[in-house]
Image: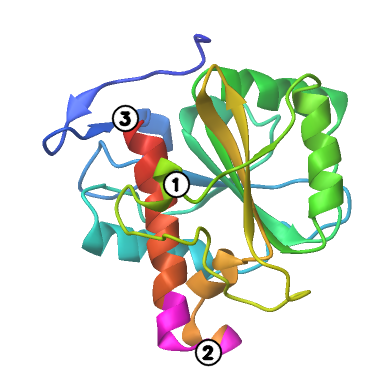
């Protein structure tokens, strides 16, 4: 583990262990142990800023329904940001291409190896370039499609058929691809599901309430799995 990570283990609820963010990364939230999520700004042509209401809605849902404290403020940073290692969970989304420079790939490799996690939500058209970029991060690690029995699908809410299908896109079944280091899931790519769109305000996509609920619950599962394992 690199010295850039500052882990503080504290019991908030039984069996709940949380990462405590440094003072410089805290928001005005009452709980200084609240985990803070960072949205990753990337290059290559994709719209990293897509869905501004997504994370705030997910955070609100998790704080109301799960035994996890999430800071309400969304942080936005690049892989070369000096504060990268302050945040245990990175969120990436958008449409189209994504590219990591050699420096960025190295930083992401170091971050994930040190205990960080990356969740990538494919809003559309990201799969090919994301997989190529992750090959630069882990040349010897290929992505693995997660089986429906994998713990991330039942650690809090039960998804017996894997990722929920929120948007049609190409009408393919949703798939969850993971990258592992020593049996630890360090990166997750949600394909043909687009749960990120399901987190957005109802007025943005006008999804049925049951789809929005499924998307939010799956997001809660991802956070719960990452922060408790």
| Quarter containing the C terminus | top left
As drawn, 41 above or below 144? below
Q: How many other residues sit within 10 Å of disc 2, few (<14), some (14-19) or many (≥20)? A: few
**Mark 1 sits on what residue?**
149
Task: Report the magenta stretch's main SS.
Answer: helix
Between the residue at mark 3 and the residue at mark 1, the CA separation in whole angstroms equals 30 Å
**Mark 2 sits on what residue?**
203
What scheme was used to colour the molecule? rainbow
| Residue 132 x/y as whole percent | 86, 38
Q: Earlier in the sequence, mark 2 or mark 3?
A: 3
Give 82 or 170, whichever is nearer the viewer.
Answer: 170
Foreground: disc 2 or disc 3: 2
Which residue appears at 60% of the width and 37% of the height? Answer: 187
| Residue 78 x/y as whole percent | 69, 39
Secondary structure found at label 2: helix
Q: Answer with left or right where residue 115 lies relative to residue 146.
A: left
Q: Quick check: marks 2 and 3 in contact, CB under 8 Å?
A: no
Q: Earlier in the sequence, mark 1 or mark 2?
A: 1
**Mark 3 sits on what residue?**
20
Foreground: disc 3 or disc 1: 1
Q: Quadrant of residue 23?
A: top left
Q: Which residues are magenta?
A: 205-212
Foreground: disc 1 or disc 2: 1
Between the residue at mark 1 and the residue at mark 2, the CA separation in whole angstroms equals 34 Å
Q: Quadrant of residue 219?
A: bottom left
Which residue appears at 41% of the width and 82% of the height? Answer: 210
Residue 57 is marked as none
């Amino acid at each position: 583990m690199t010295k850039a990570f500052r882990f503080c283990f504290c019991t908030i609820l039984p069996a709940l262990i949380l990462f405590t963010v440094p003072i410089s990364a805290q928001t005005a939230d009452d709980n200084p142990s609240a985990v803070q999520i960072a949205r990753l700004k990337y290059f290559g042509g994709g719209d990293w800023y897509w869905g501004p209401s997504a994370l705030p809605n997910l955070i609100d849902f998790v704080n109301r329904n799960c035994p996890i404290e999430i800071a309400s403020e969304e942080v936005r940073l690049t892989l070369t940001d000096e504060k990268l290692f302050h945040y245990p969970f990175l969120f990436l989304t958008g449409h189209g291409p994504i590219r990591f420079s050699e420096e960025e790939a190295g930083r992401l490799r170091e971050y994930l190896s040190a205990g960080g996690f990356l969740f990538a939500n494919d809003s559309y058209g990201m799969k090919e370039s994301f997989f190529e970029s992750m090959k630069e991060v882990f040349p010897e690690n290929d992505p693995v499609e997660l089986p429906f029995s994998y713990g991330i699908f039942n650690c809090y809410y039960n998804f017996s058929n894997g990722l929920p299908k929120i948007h049609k896109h190409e009408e393919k079944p949703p798939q969850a691809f993971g990258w592992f280091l020593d049996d630890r899931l360090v990166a997750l790519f949600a394909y043909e599901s687009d749960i990120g769109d399901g987190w957005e305000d109802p007025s943005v996509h006008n999804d049925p309430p049951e789809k929005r609920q499924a998307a939010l619950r799956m997001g809660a599962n991802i956070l719960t799995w990452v922060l408790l394992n």
